[in-house]
Image: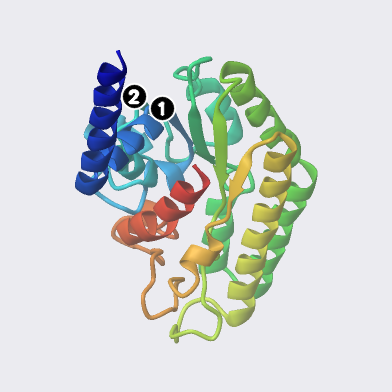
């Protein structure tokens, strides 16, 4: 009996050594860690608008394999992956159209939302086509919305997620600053406009982070990852005005998804 136990112990130690030397043990650990049911919700920053290679079956939602949720899923092989993020989505669109895959078995959820509620597209249209004073007035209007109305909208989304996926880790990702101030741009918006837009992004992120934390969710700030890669930098990860595909304007490129959003999400998830 003692001999059998000794043999079994020796075999276990030998197997452990082999797994360590070959890396198989680490691979097994990674597979176990990645055995999660993942649902990706949100707006165009999660669907991947701006990264190209859109899945035709997603229609106007413009989901792509180059978006951070798909990149994370490809690298981690979760047990299941539901990708319902959609271009143009507001908070009410998320609750109405995107939550069906959430269940009590869902382990991980990601979401970007709030920018469209605050009038992101209209702000940028105003700033590109109208005067500096009109731009800054529209930015201030958006900030007022973030202060007064958006918190309740975010609360509704976050509560709906928790009700359907009570055990999930929920990662709420923010938005990047658009511009490098004092950068290489010699035309387009004024520095005052660029600063106002950057400040508004910070304002939106702060409001979103507060609501996320109050619901027990993780807030993942992408601003550090995008620093040095804003519009007017030498290596931008964001589209400026794209007249050939206007919907991609002011959205992350494929590099912005893989180099900015993906590592930020990976660290939080």
Q: Is residue 129 visible?
A: no
Q: Residue at x 68, y 68 (%)?
A: 136
Q: Nearer the viewer, residue 12 or 38?
A: 12
Q: Nearer the viewer, residue 195 or 123?
A: 195
How far across and down, in percent of the image, does residue 10 sit?
A: 26, 31
Q: Which numbered disc, 2 or 1, marks the residue that appears first in the sequence?
A: 1
Contact (Cβ within 8 Å) of mark 2 with mark 1? yes
Q: Is residue 162 visible?
A: yes
Say above or below: 95 vs 249: above
Q: Which residue is mark 1?
A: 36
Q: Residue at x 33, y 62 (%)?
A: 243
How far across and down, in percent of the image, does residue 76 sit?
A: 32, 38
Q: Secondary structure at mark 2?
A: loop
How far across and down, in percent of the image, does residue 251 sit?
A: 42, 56
The residue positioned farthest toward the front in the image shown: 2
Q: Which residue is mark 2?
A: 79
- Label disc, if present, on residue 151 of the rendered structure: none
Q: Residues within 10 Å of mark 1 (few under 14, many from 20)?
A: many
Q: Nearer the viewer, residue 5 or 53?
A: 5
């Amino acid at each position: 009996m003692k001999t059998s136990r000794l043999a079994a112990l020796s075999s276990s130690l030998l197997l452990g050594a082999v797994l360590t030397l070959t890396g198989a043990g680490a691979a097994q650990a990674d597979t176990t860690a990645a055995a999660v049911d993942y649902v990706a919700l949100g707006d165009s920053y999660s669907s991947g608008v701006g990264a190209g290679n859109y899945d035709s079956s997603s229609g106007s939602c413009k989901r792509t394999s180059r978006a951070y949720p798909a990149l994370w899923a490809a690298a981690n092989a979760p047990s299941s992956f539901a990708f319902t993020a959609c271009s143009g989505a507001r908070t009410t669109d998320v609750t109405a159209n995107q939550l069906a895959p959430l269940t009590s078995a869902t382990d991980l959820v990601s979401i970007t939302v709030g920018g469209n509620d605050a009038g992101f597209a209209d702000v940028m249209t105003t700033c590109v086509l109208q005067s500096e004073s009109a731009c800054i007035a529209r930015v201030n209007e958006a900030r007022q919305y973030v202060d007064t109305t958006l918190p309740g909208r975010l609360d509704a989304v976050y509560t709906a997620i928790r009700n359907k996926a009570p055990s999930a880790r929920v990662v709420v990702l923010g938005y990047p600053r658009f511009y490098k101030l004092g950068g290489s741009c010699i035309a387009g918006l004024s520095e005052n406009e660029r600063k106002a837009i950057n400040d508004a992004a910070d304002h939106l992120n702060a409001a979103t982070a507060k609501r996320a934390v109050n619901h027990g969710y993780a807030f993942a700030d992408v601003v550090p990852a995008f620093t040095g890669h804003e519009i007017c930098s030498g290596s931008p990860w964001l589209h400026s005005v794209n007249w050939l595909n206007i919907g991609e304007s002011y959205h992350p490129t494929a590099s912005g998804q893989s180099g900015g959003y993906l590592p930020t999400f990976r660290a939080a998830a």
